[in-house]
């Protein structure tokens, strides 16, 4: 599995985890989704992805 696919799997997992926790535990967990989304947007513009550095 390539690093790019690992990053996509990790981002999708974090979004689903944030949605589930936000729905069942506390609305503050929706901030996880916000963080992941903002990180994906900034990595598209800058080319820097912290998750890629960690998983690479």
Image: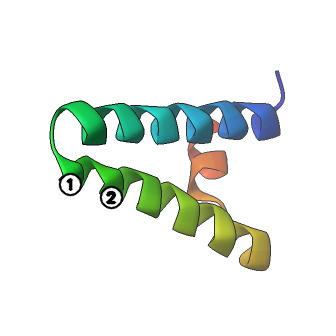
Q: Residue furthest right?
A: 2
Residue 35, quarter of picture: bottom left
Mark 2 secondary-structure assignment: helix
Question: Is the residue marked by circle 2 packed among few (<14), some (14-19), or many (20+) residues within 10 Å?
Answer: some
Q: Position of residue 7 (x, y in %)?
A: 68, 40
> Mark 2 touching mark 1, by CB under 8 A?
yes
Q: In the image shown, does 8 or 26 lie closer to the viewer? A: 26
The residue at which mark 1 appears reads as 28
Q: Position of residue 50 (x, y in %)?
A: 57, 57
Left or right, 27 with reference to 3: left
Residue occupying the point 76% across, 78% down: 45
Q: Residue furthest left?
A: 26
Cα distance, mark 2 to mark 1?
A: 6 Å
Q: In the image shown, does 44 or 23 lie closer to the viewer? A: 23
Residue 2: tell me if it is visible.
yes
What is the number of the mark on residue 31?
2
């Amino acid at each position: 599995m390539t690093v790019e696919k690992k990053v996509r799997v990790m981002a999708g997992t974090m979004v689903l985890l944030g949605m589930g926790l936000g729905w069942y535990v506390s609305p503050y967990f929706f901030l996880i989704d916000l963080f992941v989304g903002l990180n994906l947007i900034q990595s598209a513009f800058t080319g820097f992805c912290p998750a890629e550095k960690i998983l690479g």
